[in-house]
Image (cartoon, rainbow, N blue to C red):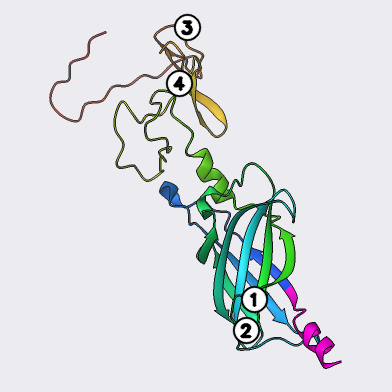
Amino acid sequence: MKRIIAILSLMITFVLVVGVSSSIIAQSLVPQGFNYQAVARDAAGEPIANQLISMKISVVSGSANGQVNYTEVHGVTTNEFGLITLTVGSGKPLQGDFKDIPWSEANQWLKIAMDTKGGEDFLEMGASQILTSPYAFYAETAGTIENPDDPGGDSRAVDWNLAGNTGSTPGTHYIGTTDSKAVLFKTDGTERMRISATGDIGVNVIPQAQFHIKGSGAVMEFAIEATAGNPDFTL
């Protein structure tokens, strides 16, 4: 009977909460990790409070028994409520690299194992699908598509920020297309300017000339203003 009770005491009940930040950090500074919280309880439902335990966490693809992409271990101490808090991606790696997890290729599952004595005698607790994908990691892979104009070069996309940009290289970094498509500019959801694939520019119109402007009324207003001196204007 004592042996059965001892075995049952290791059958920990977990309440799993996976917190994932869905906001992408500016300038591709994507944090390599996401938050994990769990409440450890004994067979009687009581929290395992203020105790050092070892956690082994694996990220697997496709299903609970899928391919293991990444495994790490943590040594954590529960609080008075039995709460465990850690960051997946910041533990001691045992297998793989967190940044190489294929978030965009398949559903990912989180497999949990634990040693309540803080050692390496891990007991598997099961696996749960990560229902909210870490979109920041997925977006980061989209930011590393190879530049067809610079094969083999720096493949990371450059972020263009609303407050201005630094570190860009004219001729290498640009806003535009690499195929025979026009570039459109809109305000309030309405097209205001278009640069055609051949370089023609149209304002409020699809350009039929190198520079084509269409007014919104019977009279088109066109102004050139100089701040000082005698400006030259040649048409």
Range of magenta residues: 1-14
The residue carrying mark 4 is 178
108 or 133: nearer the viewer:
108
- Whether pointer 3 and pointer 4 mark residues with C-beta atoms closer than 8 Å, the reply is no
Residue 47: horizontal and vertical position, in percent? 71, 86
* Label placed on residue 154: none
Classify mark 4: helix, strand or loop.
loop
- Whether pointer 4 and pointer 2 mark residues with C-beta atoms closer than 8 Å, the reply is no
* Label placed on residue 121: 1
Q: Is residue 83 above or below residue 80?
A: above
Amino acid at pointer 4: Thr
Q: Residues within 10 Å of mark 1 (few under 14, many from 20)?
A: few
* Mark in front: 2 vs 1: 1
134 or 77: nearer the viewer:
77
> In 3D space, how far apart are the residues under numbered discs 4 and 1 (Cα atoms)?
55 Å
Amino acid at pointer 2: Lys
**Pointer 2 or 3: first along the chain:** 2
Q: Residue at x 73, y 74 (%)?
A: 14
Q: Is residue 49 above or below residue 25?
A: below
Would residue 9 be counted in the magenta stretch? yes
The residue carrying mark 2 is 117
